[in-house]
Amino acid sequence: MIWSIYLHVISLFFLSSMSFICLILSLVSLQLNMVSMIEWEIMSLNSSSVAMVMIFDWVSFMFLSFVLFISSMVLFYSGEYMKGDKNYNRFMYLVLAFVFSMGALIISPNLISILLGWDGLGLVSYALVIFYQNEKSANAGMLTVLSNRVGDVAILLSISLVFIMGGWNFILYSSYMNDSNTLLIKLLVILAAMTKSAQIPFSAWLPAAMAAPTPVSALVHSSTLVTAGVYLLIRFSYALQGSVSVSMLLIISCLTMFMAGLGANFEYDLKKIIALSTLSQLGVMISILALGFNDLAFFHLLAHALFKALLFMCAGVIIHSVKEYQDIRCMGSLVYSMPLTSTCMNLANLALCGMPFLAGFYSKDLILEVAFMSNINMIAFMLYSVATGLTVCYTFRLIYYSLSGLFNLSSMSSVDDNVWVMTSPMIMLSIGAVMGGAFLSWIIFPEAYMICLSFVFKTLALSLSVSGALIGYMLNNMNVNYSLKSLGSYNVVVFSGSMWFMPFLSTLKLSFTVLKNGGVYEKVMDKGWSEYFGGQGLYSSIMKYSGYLQFGQSNSVSLYMKSFFFWVIVLFFILI
């Protein structure tokens, strides 16, 4: 069909217009302090109504606006990136289903109706991760879907526990969840958010999900799947305040932030480096949310979505140009042949580092200053500080290897950025990466935060960034000696670069005993004793003995003669 060829153009116009409408509605709702809820009762169960509920406030409208805008850019970008793929239409429909699932999750304040979006995200993400049908994609998809199922079970259990309050609308009951009786509900919600947002010990699936096409990575890691857990915690933030559970959440998120930053400094896969940077930023969001500042977490969620989608799009253009290489050691000097892509990528990288007056600066710098002002312990403070330096360190390492370092490309590579279908969405998102932070800060915080810090703490974030940038660029500039020295501490390098063995612990280590015992049981029982004494063995025995009976009942002269001689012999021996 003709319209399916231009599906990316139709999606661009429809989703971008919807995004603009949602943005206007968000501003109106924020100005008038207006919240609208639509409730449709499906059935009544034990005086509790199972209802489909939708909430429309400035938060849901704003988040929907960003999701739809980024989705429209990603779908238009996919028109060129996935061109020629025989499953192009299926890919576009799956991405649209992904966007619909995220929209359903955003507007659901009800634990039952939220399942529509929550499970939809898990199912469609599995279908997208295994889009390229090979063993690596199948393994990554299985790890992704099984990790997310843990969170799905936690949501299902929390549904049964919230029922004791008389309904499932957690927006209404959040203020009643501050006693010890609801601690289990809060722990289950935190567990669900940790699996979706890939916090320790569920971090392994996020880099593994890079097996999906790059446009999917741009969507998943900016505003959809991984942010669903953060968004759920933002909605539950009033119930979590002052709870014992948030202390645990703070240390887990800080450890995730540190682990991801450390791992990215030892990684050579372009997409996995950006995936680990997403993991680090998710740790930033959840840590500040654990400290009680849900508005700051939402602010960073939106600002991060803009430059992270841009970063993945730039990575996709580079991978497309260098003949599907993803190893950054096989790139270099791309700034000369791809100036537009390099400019956009540097903008996104600097926004990620929190460079002053780019999108990431307004949210990240404010988060760090508020965290330094808060009543946190020394461990959390050190993890915040080191993770900030590591972020800039791996960013400048990435810039050296891919954009400004030595030319390591194959002679077969035809590197340019002349494809306007891929570069025009990048330019739009670059505007967001430059101006988005200031725009959001004016809207969300019309009155500025009061920050009272000494000069040392005020300049700490900037000094950490500068030192991280110098270390990241200079160490890799001397990459030969650095690589040789790293062989001397091989165990430390492997431990740091493999996300603290989390992929191994999440897959082989977790399933080895079960699979081994299952194999023994299959060999000894299913194909052994159960086969002999079970259905097949019983059937064979019955058929065998019924054959003997059938033969005995047949009028056979030979049988009569044999039995006659048998009894003659028996009698002969008895009489003797």
Image: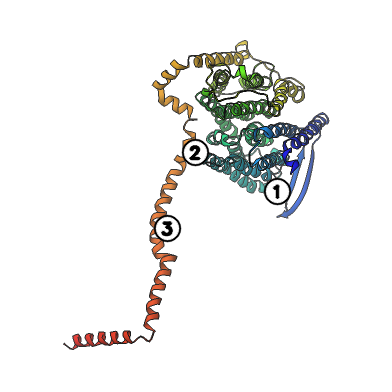
Q: CA distance from mark 2 to mark 1?
A: 37 Å
Residue 166 circle label:
1
Q: Quadrant of the N terminus?
A: top right
Which kind of residue does numbered mark 2 sit on?
Ser
Disc 2 or disc 3, which is closer to the eye?
3
Classify mark 3: helix, strand or loop. Answer: helix
Residue drawn at 78 percent across, 41 percent down: 37
Q: Which residue is mark 3?
A: 526
Q: Earlier in the sequence, mark 2 or mark 3?
A: 2
Q: Which residue is mark 2?
A: 506
**Residue lying farthest top?**
455
For residue 74, side relative to residue 319 (left or right): right
Check disc 1: other Cα within 10 Å, few if <14, some if 14-19, many if 20+. Answer: few
Give percent across and percent down for residue 126.
Answer: 60, 42
Q: Earlier in the sequence, mark 2 or mark 1?
A: 1
Give percent across and percent down for residue 238.
Answer: 68, 34
Which kind of residue does numbered mark 3 sit on?
Asp
Check disc 2: other Cα within 10 Å, few if <14, some if 14-19, many if 20+. Answer: some
Classify mark 1: helix, strand or loop. Answer: loop
Check disc 3: other Cα within 10 Å, few if <14, some if 14-19, many if 20+. Answer: some
Residue 197 visible, this angle: yes
Front one among 321 and 371: 321
Q: Give the image quarter of residue 187.
A: top right
Q: Give the image quarter of residue 191.
A: top right
Give percent across and percent down for residue 513.
Answer: 42, 45
Q: Quadrant of the C terminus?
A: bottom left
Give percent across and percent down for residue 139.
Answer: 52, 41
Front one among 457 and 348: 348
Q: CA distance from mark 2 to mark 3?
A: 28 Å
